[in-house]
């Protein structure tokens, strides 16, 4: 599914529509994870896009008096297409039509969603989310403080969106490997020094993934048509029974919280 780096890549690709007028939104299928509000078309017609940004994995398109929230769900993606191009793909559920180009929301599994709100930070889907991992506030003291109160293993803790947003399964495994921390280690046993290493590793992995355009595991493309290439740089994720790039020990796959987890028992003891 699209994770934080893929969503950030998407936001950067559609930033070109800032300061442009959205002529209209056309909804082809309202039956997404939540039904698309019936007022959304009229409320966004001929509105100036002031800013396009991200909160967690939500794409936020700000107008003067409200904000469009888009979540890509498990299989969603946006693509940019010329308005005079009538090419239509199966599972194209919505179109944001501008003067010469349009943004198309495609979602085969329909776990994505589109909402309109006056304040996204007060919206029920965003208001209880945790800290942004690339923010200055996410530091060793923040992580250490939540770790010392928790009996969860560290991988579950950093993937909990109420603690830290956007550290998905791929990036959790990669960050823990870089920090040399066993993903099964109980959070309250994580030291301040380990917290520091893990925070730095999470930031490094996410920034590098964003730089590389996200991770192509199935068919992720940014809206401008570019693939993500981060998968070619993965150290542990999806590499079970292959040699560790650091010590040549075999990478092992385990299941933590019903999610596939990849680690090196020698490097992450």
Image: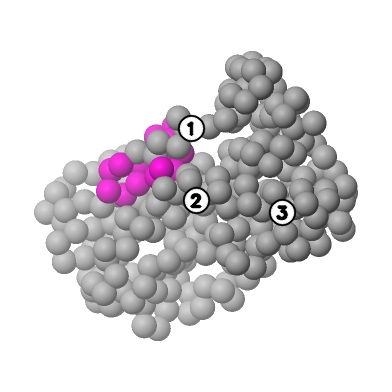
Q: Look at the image and say whether residue 214 sits in the magenta stretch.
A: yes
Closer to viewer: mark 1 or mark 3: 3
Closer to viewer: mark 2 or mark 3: 3
Q: Are marks 1 and 2 in contact (CB under 8 Å)?
A: no
Residue at horizontal 39 percent and vertical 58 percent from the top: 11
Q: Residue 73, position in %: x, y?
A: 51, 49
Q: Secondary structure at mark 1?
A: helix
Q: In this picture, which residue range is highlighted in magenta? A: 212-226
Q: Residue 113, position in %: x, y?
A: 48, 57
Label 1 and label 2: CA atoms lie apart by 13 Å
Residue 207, numbered circle = 2
Residue 233, numbered circle = 1
Q: Are marks 2 and 3 in contact (CB under 8 Å)?
A: no
Residue at horizontal 68 percent and vertical 18 percent from the top: 249
- Asked if 168 appears above or below 61 in the picture, the reply is above
Q: Is residue 235 left or right of residue 61?
A: right
- Asked if 151 appears above or below 173 in the picture, the reply is below
Label 2 and label 3: CA atoms lie apart by 17 Å
Who comes first in sequence, dot 1 or dot 3? 3
Residue at horizontal 66 percent and vertical 57 percent from the top: 164
Q: Residue 187, position in %: x, y?
A: 83, 48
According to the picture, the residue beneath numbered tag 3 turns out to be 196
Question: In this view of the protein, which residue sits in the foreground, 88 or 67?
Answer: 67
Q: Quadrant of residue 43?
A: bottom left
Q: Residue 154, position in %: x, y?
A: 77, 45
Q: Look at the image and say whether residue 89 sits in the magenta stretch.
A: no
């Amino acid at each position: 599914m699209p994770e934080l780096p893929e969503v950030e890549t998407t936001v950067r690709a559609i930033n070109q529509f800032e300061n442009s007028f959205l002529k209209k939104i056309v909804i082809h299928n309202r039956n997404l994870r939540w039904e698309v509000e019936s007022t959304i078309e009229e409320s966004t017609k001929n509105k100036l896009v002031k800013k396009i940004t991200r909160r967690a994995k939500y794409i936020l398109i700000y107008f003067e008096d409200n904000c469009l929230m888009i979540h890509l769900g498990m299989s969603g993606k946006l693509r940019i297409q010329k308005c005079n191009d009538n090419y239509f793909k199966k599972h194209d559920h919505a179109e944001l039509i501008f003067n010469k180009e349009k943004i198309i929301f495609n979602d085969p599994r329909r776990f994505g969603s589109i909402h309109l709100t006056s304040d996204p930070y007060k919206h029920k889907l965003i208001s209880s989310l945790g800290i942004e991992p690339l923010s200055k506030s996410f530091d060793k003291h923040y992580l250490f403080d939540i770790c010392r109160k928790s009996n969860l293993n560290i991988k579950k803790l950093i993937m909990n969106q109420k603690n830290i947003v956007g550290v998905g399964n791929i990036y959790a495994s990669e960050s823990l490997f870089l920090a040399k921390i066993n993903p099964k280690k109980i959070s309250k046993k994580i030291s301040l020094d380990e917290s520091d290493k893990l925070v730095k590793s999470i930031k490094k992995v996410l920034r590098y993934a964003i730089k590389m355009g996200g991770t192509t595991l199935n068919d992720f493309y940014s809206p401008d048509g570019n693939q993500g290439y981060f998968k070619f740089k993965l150290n542990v994720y999806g590499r079970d029974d292959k040699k560790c790039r650091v010590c040549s020990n075999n990478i092992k796959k385990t299941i933590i919280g019903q999610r596939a987890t990849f680690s090196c028992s020698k490097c992450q003891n």
